[in-house]
């Protein structure tokens, strides 16, 4: 029923937009001031600032806790970097401190490449960890508008930015600590630098391409390789056309130098520049969690704590059913899952515009299609649930650009002029574009309130957990007593960048074995926290 209602609403919205396009032809009003603002050099920065405000509104604060295991690992590593260190000292007894995606021996550090955690450091210094994801979203918003304006026109850019900034799929992940916020910015920056290089031929712009792609690689290697491939093809074709490869030498060397950060990371964490923490973590705890098909029967090097065994079982189920024969179905399911989330609610109309543009893609639109296909194909090497669309978030600006092109076509602009930044739009198209933005704005604003409520639900568990832990006296140990029914994807236990100075240690409850940890920290007061009820009580050890 909801699908039918959304389809009917989409038809009504598209019909209304087409009426706007027709009636605007007979009006005399000209949106000259709006157009002047959109063409101004500071419009991207202004709209990027609005994006930051939107993220802050739906997230409620810049001090929100990480929700899923990945976020908490990135935050921990950012806190370690913020102290000027690559790793933290190992805990006194590792069994109490095991954490998903984190090594606890020979030192404490996250398994992930270092670039994203480094990007989070300024927020850690300021006591506002959420500041950097919001700032990265703002930069992405500015780049999205700038690119759309450069490749089409100011009105297409406005619609692209507005639809992307207010999209629930954008905001749900912009209000997180996941690394896609860094790779989205690096991908957009590389694309923008490529456009500038194609126009000017200046080496500095090619240097920007190399730096952005290299830094993105240090955040999400596979993602950036997949997205770099189409850009690399465009750049290589241009170099062949102009008959020189010398201009690429310095940018290439700069990119290689930045990639050296990953080798330093390997050396500083594991003592061997050739060993990658990400791969070693998989071999240590989840030998099957790697590119490929099926389950690797190799036993883990280190047993998981009982609380994380459900994560092992869940992950095994995902990998067991993923074989070569499942690839075509997986590809279709992943594409449809992204489209379904992209087109949720009234945005079914935006999804229809996107599909229409994909069918008629040319020029920059065709490039966006190729980049999207490249990323989806790359991740066919990994087993993951179809609904885990976070791997494809870097595509959202391009997908909304395609939808905006479709919308401009609906409003009466030809597909050729929609993709030609040199064409002056008619007054009628400018009017219809402004009116379409005004018509869609209330719908976009309702999405903000809906996303804010959804984020409140998503963050409720960890907000409450942080509140209870802060209520514990300073210099304490909080033993977390998980129940079998607790959600294994939501953790309370954690490691610290500096265990000695931490206000509270939040660790697993190990029953009578708790006294071993207490013996190593006799000055700390013991408490028990039950996540199912958030009840915090003093720990009473059994009498011997």
Image (cartoon, rainbow, N blue to C red):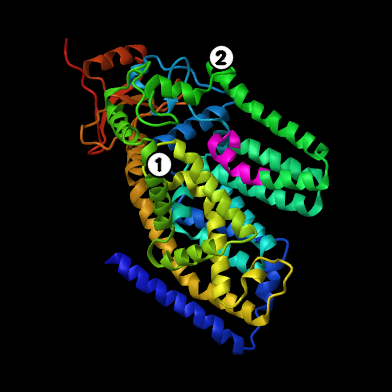
Q: Nearer the viewer, residue 60 or 290?
A: 290
Q: Secondary structure at mark 1?
A: helix
Frontmost of labels 1 and 2 is: 1
Looking at the image, residue 290 sits to the left or right of residue 226; the answer is: left
Please state, as top left, top right, bottom left or bottom right, where the C terminus lies in the image.
top left
- What residue occupies the far top of the structure in this picture? 544
Left or right of 171 on screen, residue 517: left
Task: Name the spot of residue 122 as percent of width and height, x first.
Answer: 59, 38
Q: Write the start and end of the magenta stretch as one range.
A: 217-232
- Secondary structure at badge 2 equals loop
**Residue hosting label 2:** 271
In front of the other: 431 or 299? 299
**Can you tell which mark lies on residue 111?**
none
Q: CA distance from mark 1 to mark 2?
A: 37 Å
Task: Please name the predominant secondary structure of the magenta segment in the image.
Answer: helix
> Compared with residue 466, is residue 398 higher up or lower down, i.e. above or below?
below
Q: Which residue is at a point 39% across and 29% down the rendered structure image?
A: 100
Question: Residue 49: percent from the left, percent from the top?
Answer: 60, 57
Q: Is the N terminus in the top left, top right, bottom left or bottom right quadrant? A: bottom left
Q: Residues within 10 Å of mark 2 (few under 14, many from 20)?
A: few
Residue 277 percent location from the top left of the image: 50, 23
Quarter holding residue 346? bottom left
Numbered mark located on residue 327 in the image:
1
Rendered view: 11 above or below 493? below
Magenta span contains residue 226: yes
How many numbered markers are drawn?
2
């Amino acid at each position: 029923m909801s699908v039918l209602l959304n389809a009917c609403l989409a038809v009504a919205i598209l019909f209304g937009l087409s009426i706007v396009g027709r009636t605007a032809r007979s009006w005399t009003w000209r949106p000259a001031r709006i157009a002047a603002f959109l063409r101004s050099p500071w419009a991207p920065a202004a709209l990027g600032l609005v994006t930051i405000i939107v993220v802050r509104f739906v997230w409620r604060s810049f001090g929100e806790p990480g929700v899923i295991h990945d976020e908490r690992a990135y935050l921990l590593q950012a806190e370690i970097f913020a102290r000027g260190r690559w790793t933290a000292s190992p805990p006194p007894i590792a069994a109490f401190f095991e954490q998903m995606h984190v090594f606890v021996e020979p030192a404490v550090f996250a398994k992930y490449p270092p670039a994203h955690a480094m990007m989070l450091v300024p927020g850690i210094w300021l006591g506002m960890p959420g500041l950097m994801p919001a700032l990265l979203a703002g930069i992405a918003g500015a780049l999205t508008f700038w690119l759309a304006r450069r490749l089409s026109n100011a009105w297409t850019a406005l619609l692209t930015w507005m639809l992307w900034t207010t999209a629930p799929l954008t905001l749900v992940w912009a209000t997180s600590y996941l690394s896609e916020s860094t790779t989205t910015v690096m991908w957009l920056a590389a694309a923008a630098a490529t456009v500038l290089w194609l126009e000017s031929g200046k080496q500095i712009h090619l240097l920007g391409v190399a730096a952005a792609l290299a830094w993105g690689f240090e955040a999400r290697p596979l993602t950036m390789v997949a997205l770099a491939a189409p850009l690399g093809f465009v750049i290589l074709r241009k170099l062949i056309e102009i008959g020189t490869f010398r201009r690429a030498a310095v940018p290439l060397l700069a990119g290689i130098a930045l990639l050296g950060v990953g080798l330093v990371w390997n050396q500083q964490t594991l003592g061997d520049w050739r060993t990658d923490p990400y791969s070693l973590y998989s071999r240590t705890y989840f030998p099957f969690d790697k590119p490929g098909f099926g389950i690797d029967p190799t036993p883990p090097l280190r047993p998981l704590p009982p609380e994380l065994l459900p994560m092992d079982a869940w992950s095994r189920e995902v990998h067991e059913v993923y074989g070569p024969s499942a690839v075509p179905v997986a590809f279709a399911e992943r594409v449809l899952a992204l489209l379904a989330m992209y087109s949720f609610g009234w945005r079914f109309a935006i999804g229809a515009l996107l599909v229409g543009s994909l069918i008629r893609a040319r020029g920059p639109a065709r490039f966006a299609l190729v980049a999207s296909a490249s990323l989806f194909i790359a991740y066919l090497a990994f087993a993951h649930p179809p609904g885990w669309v976070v791997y494809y978030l870097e595509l959202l600006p391009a997908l909304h650009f395609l939808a905006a092109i479709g919308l401009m076509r609906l409003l009466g602009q030809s597909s050729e002029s929609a993709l030609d930044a040199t064409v002056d739009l008619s007054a009628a198209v400018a009017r219809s574009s402004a009116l379409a933005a005004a018509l869609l704005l209330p719908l976009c604003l309702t999405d903000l309130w809906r996303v804010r409520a959804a984020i409140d639900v998503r963050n409720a568990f960890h907000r409450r957990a942080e509140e209870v832990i802060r209520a514990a006296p300073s210099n304490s140990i909080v033993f977390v007593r998980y129940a079998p029914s607790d959600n294994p994807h939501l953790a309370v236990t954690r490691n610290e960048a500096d265990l000695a100075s931490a206000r509270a240690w939040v660790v697993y409850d190990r029953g009578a074995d708790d006294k071993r940890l207490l013996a190593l920290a006799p000055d700390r007061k013991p408490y028990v926290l039950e996540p199912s009820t958030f009840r915090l009580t003093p720990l009473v050890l059994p009498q011997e």
